[in-house]
Every structure is written in structure tokens, then in C-alpha cells.
Image (cartoon, grey):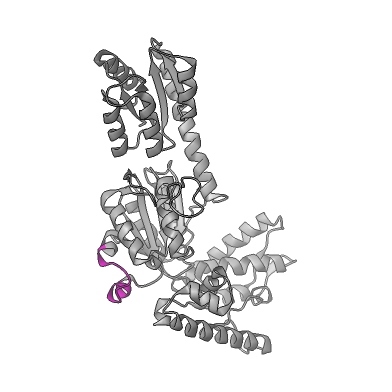
């Protein structure tokens, strides 16, 4: 239900506006002076603020300026019995959505309110679309017939309708974000935004800005206010992937958000209320991280109110053919190719493989096989083109020189990265400089070889 704040010092007018808006189905709060209105706007997130121009303690233009400072997306409608062109222009320049001159018809007010709410909805929708780019809120089908995947799916269905914080545990590539999206899709917040952020993919010094936003001038180059992911996700859900990689200082700030449901932008002094459901995920043992003092115990208990473990693909081998066929259909459709099927030998190979990269690796393998396969049947030759080189993985017996060479190169890279990480005490940015690669390349190598902080200790 949209929430509207009415700021009007005349008691009869305030009561009339409140009654009119409530009869339209809106939730309404009202105050009698400008300063009280601004204070209320700091405490709650209003969809529309309807304010008089002439007010005690702070006039309407001051209210407009302050409210826009608190939440730039709030629609502010100005009312006055002293309407002039100059005042209207000034209000519009400060960000007012509309301007009403008293007396006005309540039907006209209703139209203006609806237009303001639609404008706010479009602004929020556009923000989310920019944040998510091509990501769709669809595709929540979780494929599998194994008992383990059924158990995880049942837990998702049970917790989805509540606002409980959920922590997904499991290896990289098991589909934790898919499960998080499923929770959002099944929840009462499904019409709100779903915002995902990988805490390990962004350098620590930039992550605070991404999560909580920043004010203009907060740092060199900050020429405008930036909304953080928590603000973007307001009324929806935020998915914090690889939360175990959060810097300890940021862990403290995240704990405050979970406890108080408020944030402060970088360089700001105002406390902003946020209505966000937090869903987190980790592929590292957080209890082990707590023992090493790299993860806060109090934050862990806040995040793990409802933990769900997503099984590795090798623990749900019955699901491999179903997933493979799903990906074959998907990529045949996307590549505009005729339908294909897996040979019996290809299915056997998929079921025997260790899958260290889990479902993500399976999807990549199938995508490449569809590119390579010109006939109707995907065979082991199409799958074997992508052979991971980690020593514990045996995709097939009798590896040739090509595979041996790839294995030797991978082992050399892995050993060097471990030594440099140890030298830099786990500082990935310094390690990237020593290795003469960019941060993204190093990050991908760390993921590929399964290296974590413990390898540098």
C-alpha cells in the first residue's frame, strides 16, 4: 500500500486531505509543520509527500529540498493559496513533481497523486533494470529429481513467504543465486527489486560504495550522489554472494544494517531506513573463518537464521542427465540449431566426471558441445574438448601430451599464485601487481584453482 505524508498546518485542511487519500486506499500520515515533516521523512520511506508552501518552522520549499536530500526518488507535490509562476518554477527546479493552487478539486488531487506514484514506480523500475542489465527475474525452475536437491527446494519453499534472513552454503557453481532468486520470486516481495552483488569480485575499497552508496564529494571523483545496492533493493531482496570475503570493517556495517535496518551513505551523516530482505551465500566455511578471526561471529548468527546447503553436483548424479538435457534445449534454441540429444557414452561420461565447477561447469561444457556438434547427437568427443587440468579430476583415462601440458601449466600457475599470496598476506591487489596481471584475471585464476585465503596462510 503506497505511503503518503501530508504536511498541512490548517487542521480542517489536514483532516480533509487525510480522509480523501485514505478513501482512495492509501496509507496516510500527517503533521502540522515543516520540520516535523522532514523528521518523519527521515524515519520512514514515503512514496509521496504532499506539503503546503506556507508552514511553521520550515516552509514548503525547505521541506522539498530536505526530502529530496533524504530520498531523491520521493515524489513531492506542493500546495499553496499564494501560487505564482515564480514559486512554481522554483519548486520544479528543486525537484517537485507537481504544484497545486488552493482551492483545488479532490478529483484533480487524486489524478496528481496517481501520476506521482506512477512516476516513482517508473523511476525505481528503471533503476533496477540498469542495475540488473539483462538479468531476468524469470528462470526460477530448479531442475533435479535427487533427494538432496528436493530437500533444498522444500526448505526454500518453506522460508520464502517469511522475511527471515537466509544463508546459502555450498561450493561455487552449485546455483546459490538461482535459489536466492527463487526465494525472492516466491516471497511477498516478488514485485520489488532483486539485487545481487558478488562481495569477492569487487575490491574492498570500492565495495562499501557499492553497498551503501555515497554523497557528492565523498571521495575524489564523486561528482554526484550514488545510490548503493541496499537503497536500490528497497522493498525487495538483496543477495550478498560470497559474503565470507567481506572485509572486517564492512562486516560491522552489514551487522548494523541487519540489526537496525538503516544505512548511511559514504560521506553522509544522515541515517536512511531501508526495507530489504537479506539473502547471503558463502562457498567457504564461515565457522572456520570465525575461528581464524576473519569473520565476525555475531554477523554469522545474524546471517544464518535459516541456513540451506546446496549439494555439489557430484552428490546429485541422478540430476546430471536432466540438467544436461535442459542446457542442450536452451542452447539449441539460443543458437537457432536443430534439437540434439546426448549419446549413451556421453551420458556415462558426464555421470562419471567429478564436476569441481558444479552446475556452472556443466552448463559451460554443454554450451561448447552444442557449438562443436554439427549433427544430431552430442558425443564424448564434443564434451572432452573442455578438460579441466586440476590433478584430482580425471575426465578420461590415458591423457595425452596436450592434457599433460595443460596440467603442468596449471600446477605451475597455482603454485606461483599461492607463493605470492603468502608473500602479500592474502592481499589480492598486491598479488596481481607482482604477477603482472589485472585484478579480474587473478580473481578468475583463484576461482579456477579453488584458492582461498587459507592457502596464503
Q: In front: 180, or 321?
A: 180
- Which picture quadrant has residue 325? bottom right
Q: Position of residue 355 (x, y in %)?
A: 52, 75
Q: Which residue is drawn at the image coordinates 68% and 65% (left, top)? A: 370
Q: Is residue 391 visible?
A: no
Q: Which residue is drawn at the image coordinates 45% and 79% (left, top)? A: 424
Q: Position of residue 243 (x, y in %)?
A: 39, 64
Q: Is residue 221 magenta?
A: no
Q: Position of residue 428 (x, y in %)?
A: 48, 73
The residue furthest right is 374
Q: Quadrant of the N terminus?
A: top left
Q: Is residue 321 visible?
A: yes
Q: State the extent of the magenta-drawn residues as a range.
A: 287-298
Relative to 94, 292 lies left or right = left
Q: Quadrant of the C terminus?
A: bottom left
- Which picture quadrant has residue 219? bottom left
Q: Is residue 296 magenta?
A: yes
Q: Which residue is drawn at the image coordinates 54% and 75% (left, top)? A: 433
Please determine whether, in this image, residue 209 is positioned above or below residue 233. Answer: below
Please determine whether, in this image, residue 198 is positioned above or below residue 361. Answer: above
Q: Position of residue 395 (x, y in %)?
A: 58, 81
Amino acid at each position: 500500500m503506497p505511503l503518503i505524508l501530508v504536511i498541512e498546518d490548517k487542521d480542517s485542511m489536514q483532516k480533509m486531505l487525510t480522509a480523501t487519500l485514505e478513501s482512495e486506499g492509501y496509507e496516510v500520515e500527517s503533521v502540522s509543520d515543516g520540520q516535523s515533516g522532514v523528521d518523519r521523512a527521515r524515519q520512514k520511506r514515503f512514496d509521496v509527500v504532499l506539503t503546503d508552501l506556507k508552514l511553521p518552522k520550515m516552509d514548503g520549499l525547505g521541506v522539498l529540498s530536505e526530502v529530496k536530500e533524504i530520498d531523491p526518488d520521493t515524489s513531492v507535490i506542493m500546495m499553496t493559496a499564494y501560487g505564482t509562476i515564480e514559486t512554481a518554477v522554483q519548486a520544479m527546479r528543486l525537484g517537485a513533481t507537481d504544484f497545486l493552487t488552493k482551492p483545488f478539486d479532490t478529483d484533480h488531487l487524486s489524478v496528481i497523486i496517481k501520476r506521482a506514484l506512477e512516476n516513482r514506480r517508473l523511476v525505481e523500475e528503471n533503476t533496477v533494470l540498469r542495475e540488473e542489465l539483462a538479468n531476468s527475474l524469470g528462470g526460477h525452475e530448479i531442475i533435479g529429481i535427487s533427494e538432496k536437491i528436493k530437500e533444498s527446494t522444500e526448505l526454500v519453499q518453506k522460508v520464502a513467504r517469511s522475511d527471515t534472513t537466509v544463508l546459502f552454503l555450498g561450493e561455487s557453481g552449485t546455483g546459490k543465486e538461482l535459489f536466492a532468486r527463487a526465494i525472492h520470486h516466491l516471497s511477498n516481495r516478488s514485485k520489488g527489486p532483486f539485487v545481487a552483488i558478488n562481495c569477492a569480485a569487487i575490491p574492498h575499497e570500492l565495495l562499501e560504495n557499492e553497498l551503501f552508496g555515497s554523497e557528492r564529494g565523498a571521495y575524489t571523483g564523486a561528482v554526484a550522489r550514488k545510490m548503493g545496492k541496499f537503497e536500490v533493493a528497497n522493498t525487495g531482496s538483496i543477495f550478498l554472494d560470497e559474503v565470507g570475503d567481506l572485509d572486517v570493517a564492512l562486516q560491522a556495517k552489514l551487522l548494523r544494517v541487519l540489526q537496525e535496518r538503516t544505512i548511511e551513505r559514504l560521506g553522509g551523516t544522515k541515517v536512511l531506513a531501508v526495507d530489504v530482505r537479506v539473502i547471503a551465500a558463502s562457498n567457504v566455511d564461515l565457522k572456520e573463518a570465525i575461528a581464524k578471526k576473519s569473520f565476525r561471529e555475531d554477523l554469522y548468527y545474524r546471517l544464518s537464521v535459516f541456513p540451506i546447503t546446496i549439494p555439489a553436483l557430484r552428490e546429485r548424479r541422478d540430476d546430471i542427465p536432466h540438467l544436461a538435457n535442459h542446457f542442450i534445449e536452451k542452447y539449441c534454441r539460443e543458437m537457432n540449431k536443430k534439437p540434439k540429444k546426448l549419446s549413451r557414452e556421453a551420458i556415462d561420461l558426464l555421470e562419471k566426471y567429478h564436476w569441481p565447477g558444479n552446475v556452472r561447469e556443466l552448463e559451460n561444457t554443454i554450451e561448447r558441445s552444442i557449438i562443436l556438434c554439427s549433427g544430431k547427437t552430442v558425443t564424448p568427443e564434443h564434451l572432452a574438448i573442455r578438460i579441466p587440468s586440476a590433478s584430482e579430476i580425471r575426465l578420461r583415462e590415458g591423457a595425452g601430451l596436450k592434457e599433460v601440458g595443460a596440467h603442468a601449466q596449471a600446477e605451475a600457475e597455482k603454485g606461483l599464485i599461492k607463493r605470492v599470496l603468502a608473500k602479500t598476506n592474502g592481499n589480492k591487489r598486491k598479488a596481481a601487481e607482482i604477477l603482472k596481471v589485472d585484478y579480474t584475471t587473478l580473481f578468475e585464476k583463484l576461482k579456477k584453482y579453488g584458492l582461498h585465503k587459507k592457502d596464503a596462510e
